[in-house]
Image (spheres, rainbow, N blue to C red):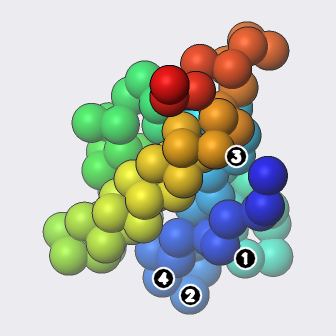
Amino acid sequence: MKQFEPARINDQYSLVLNPTGNVDLYKEGIGVVGSMSYYYTRNDLPLFICRHDPTADLRTIHDVMVQLDNQMDEMVDCGCLMVGGRNVAARY
């Protein structure tokens, strides 16, 4: 599976979706500063973002979630989503 482009929150923070359905929060110059399951806890993502960057606005959060939703759909379509070592996303 190809590496997805990071979903940028601002010049310091970005989110990256990985093949296990987790999103890793990256901070410039530091690396991963947080991680959560996007597949199971999507509704918690705005709180997750705001906890690390309280200045994030609703428009930015919406744009990030749309980008991650699109990436998740791609993973599901190609059967690339692995949770617990099993493919949980193959569509037949």
| Observer able to see residue 67 | yes
Nearer the viewer's eye, disc 3 or disc 4?
3
| Position of residue 16 measured from the top left corner of the image (x, y, whole percent) | 64, 58
Question: Are discs 2 and 1 less than 8 Å apart at CB?
Answer: yes
Say few, some or many: other residues with alpha carbon within 10 Å of mark 1 (under 14 / 14 to 19 / 20 or more).
few
Name the amino acid type tagged 1: Glu
Name the amino acid type tagged 2: Asp
For image coordinates 46% across by 48% down, the residue present is 73
Q: Earlier in the sequence, mark 1 or mark 3?
A: 3
Q: Earlier in the sequence, mark 3 or mark 4?
A: 4
For image coordinates 79% across by 52% down, the residue present is 1
Residue for badge 3: 18
Residue reaching furthest to the left: 58
Name the amino acid type tagged 3: Asn
Question: Are discs 2 and 4 less than 8 Å apart at CB?
Answer: yes
Q: Quadrant of residue 47?
A: top left
Q: Earlier in the sequence, mark 1 or mark 4?
A: 4
Residue for badge 1: 28
